[in-house]
Image (cartoon, grey):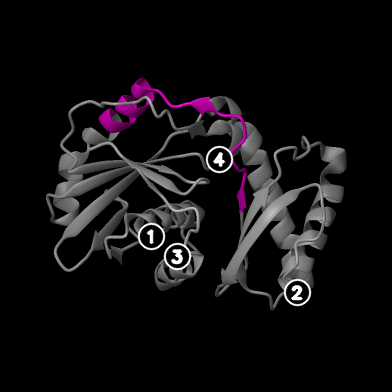
């Protein structure tokens, strides 16, 4: 297990900015790839093996990384509890509206803003949505202009960096979550194992890693089970679990 309580956000920012412009904002999966880049960026900073990202805007596998010795394909699998996905989808849609309103007032502001919302974030109701959008924008504007997170009931933490456009990425935090089981992990591995030969052929390298992401999508996410000792046999060279909000990686193979 690698845990960096003082995560190097500056180093992460450099790695992220080196690769974000390689993505096409016009593509339908742009937001998905931005999230995946967040995950892989955090993973590589925590790994501390001096890897850089060779290819970003691709699939099967999701990324190709390299260092002085190796070229490696990385495939991601995000494990979530489907019971809460609809609720969190509503929050993501809310922040798209927040961004639209913000852009109208501040068209020249261009940042990538990672927003961690509070555990007691209110249940969204149609007659209250406009008020919440206004409240969120007031807090975000104050932070962007003054670097201060004002006292509020919605946002717990903000991390932002310069960007070539405006983008808000809500993070629902580590709320009360179900604990990951060996069965959850084995199903994730089995799902990706079926496509392993395709990853090898597409990336022209036999070394393939699987990165399973948990702990990043609020109530729908799983928390790590430290009692897990074994997983199914796999052709992946390495298998890791990234606890996103806690910024911890666990190597399973």
Residue at image coords 43%, 34%: 79
Contact (Cβ within 8 Å) of mark 2 with mark 4: no
Real-space Cα distance between discs 3 and 1? 6 Å
Closer to the chain start, of discs 2 and 3, is: 3
Quarter that holds the N terminus: top left
Q: Nearer the viewer, mark 1 or mark 4?
A: 1
Q: Are marks 1 and 2 in contact (CB under 8 Å)?
A: no
Quadrant containing the C terminus in the rendered view: top left
> Relative to the observer, which residue lies in front, 213 or 205?
213
- In the rendered image, residue 234 lying in the magenta stretch gets the answer no
Residue hosting label 4? 217
175 within the magenta span: yes
Residue for point 48% across, 59% down: 7
Residue contact at pointers 3 and 1, CB within 8 angstroms: yes
Identify the disc placed on residue 195. Answer: none
Q: Nearer the viewer, mark 1 or mark 2?
A: 1
């Amino acid at each position: 297990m690698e845990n960096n309580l003082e995560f190097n956000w500056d180093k992460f920012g450099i790695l992220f900015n080196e690769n974000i412009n390689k993505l096409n904002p016009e593509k339908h999966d742009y937001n998905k790839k931005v999230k995946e880049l967040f995950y892989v960026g955090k993973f590589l900073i925590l790994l501390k093996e001096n890897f850089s990202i060779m290819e970003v805007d691709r699939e099967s596998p999701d990324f190709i990384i390299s260092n002085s010795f190796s070229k490696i394909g990385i495939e991601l699998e995000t494990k979530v509890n489907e019971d809460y996905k609809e609720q969190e989808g509503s929050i993501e849609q809310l922040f798209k509206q927040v961004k639209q309103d913000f852009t109208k007032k501040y068209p020249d502001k261009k940042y990538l803003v990672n927003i961690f919302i509070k555990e007691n974030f209110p249940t969204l109701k149609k007659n209250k949505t406009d008020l919440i959008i206004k409240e969120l924008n007031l807090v975000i504007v104050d932070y962007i202009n003054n670097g201060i997170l004002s006292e509020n009931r919605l946002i717990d933490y903000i991390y932002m960096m310069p960007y070539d456009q405006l983008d808000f990425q809500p993070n629902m935090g580590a709320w009360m979550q179900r604990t990951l089981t060996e069965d959850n992990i084995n199903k994730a591995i089995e799902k990706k194992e079926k496509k392993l030969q395709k990853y090898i052929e597409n990336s022209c390298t036999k070394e393939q890693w699987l990165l399973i992401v948990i702990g990043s999508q609020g109530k729908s996410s799983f928390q790590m089970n430290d009692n897990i000792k074994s997983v199914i046999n796999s052709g992946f060279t390495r298998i890791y679990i990234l606890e996103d909000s806690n910024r911890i990686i666990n190597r399973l193979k």
